[in-house]
Amino acid sequence: DSTQLAGCWNAVNNRFRYPSLSPIVLLSALLAPVIIPVRAANELAGNKPSVTLHASKISITTPCPSTMHSMSRSCPTAFEPPISLNTTAAGFNKRAVYTYSVTAGQIIGEGSKVSWDLSGGPGPGYYTATVEVKDNKQRRAVASATVTIANCGDCIITHDLPCGMIYLDCYDQVKAGTPITCKAAARFSIYSPITLEWSARASNDKDLSARIKKTGEYVSIPTNDLAGRTVYVSVDVIGLDPSCNRSAAASTVVKP
């Protein structure tokens, strides 16, 4: 009958009933499949490779061109030494490979520390060095560094020859008692200020240097007792490179 059927059904239920679970245990069981993937993703993100590239200089000032010189001598006389590049990499194995590329100049060396030589003559502007780091696990990262090259602002045009030039102009002849006047014209702007040293001698080998009177770029030499003689005048630039022509000479005839 119905009473016996209900009893049988309850017996079956009691035999296969699961044990009761607390709310905390049940919540943990439900969240476990979610926590595991999140933790794995965080661990992967923490191992993401990274690279930084540091340059020892971020700006370079070029020396003056061959047709110019530094007015105050504040410009560099030669192009600066190569820039040091230092790469710091994280998240790679020991077999990581460093590959560099530059928009000007060339890279010297290999590995995490190299030199960037920009002395090949690139003009003013911005130049970039880039490093790519890879390993055999297909991990890869890239970093860059930029350097500015600028002309020195103190350069001016040189109108003189490399050693400069000096001229000496004296009267061709004077009457005895009239001073000999000479003028020196020196073009040595790259060596300015310059010092001129004067000397004079008569055709009888008498030294007249003590007679020379200087007034700016002019000199005068008294001739009271030099009738019938020739006066030889010379001027030298002091401190000039010995390989350069640094002297000029002229002569004046003293008539009776």
Image: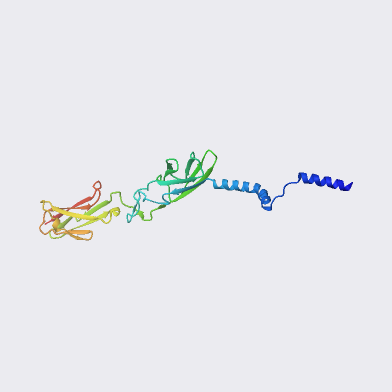
Q: Residue at x 61, y 48 (%)?
A: 38
On the picture, is 101 further left or further right than 13?
Answer: left
Question: For this rendering, which residue is in front, 193 or 181?
Answer: 193
- Which residue corresponds to the image point at 55% horizontal and 47% vertical from the top-left? 46
Q: Quick check: 8 above or below 197?
A: above
Q: How are the residues colored? A: rainbow
Number of marks in the image? Answer: 0
Name the one closer to the observer, 54 or 145. 54
Q: Can residue 197 be seen in this snapshot?
A: yes
Q: Is residue 85 left or right of residue 2?
A: left
Residue 96: image x %, image y %?
49, 40
* Residue 125 position in % (x across, y down): 45, 51
The image shows residue 11 at horizontal and vertical percentages of 80, 45
The correct choice, above or below, for 136 with respect to 219 in the image is above
* Residue in front for this viewpoint, 25 or 176: 25
Q: Position of residue 3 (x, y in %)?
A: 87, 48
Camera-side residue of 138 and 47 = 47
**Left/right of residue 163 with respect to residue 151 in the rendered view:** left
Work out which residue is located at the far bottom of the displayed protein and give it.
215
Q: Quadrant of the C terminus?
A: bottom left
Residue 103 visible? The answer is no
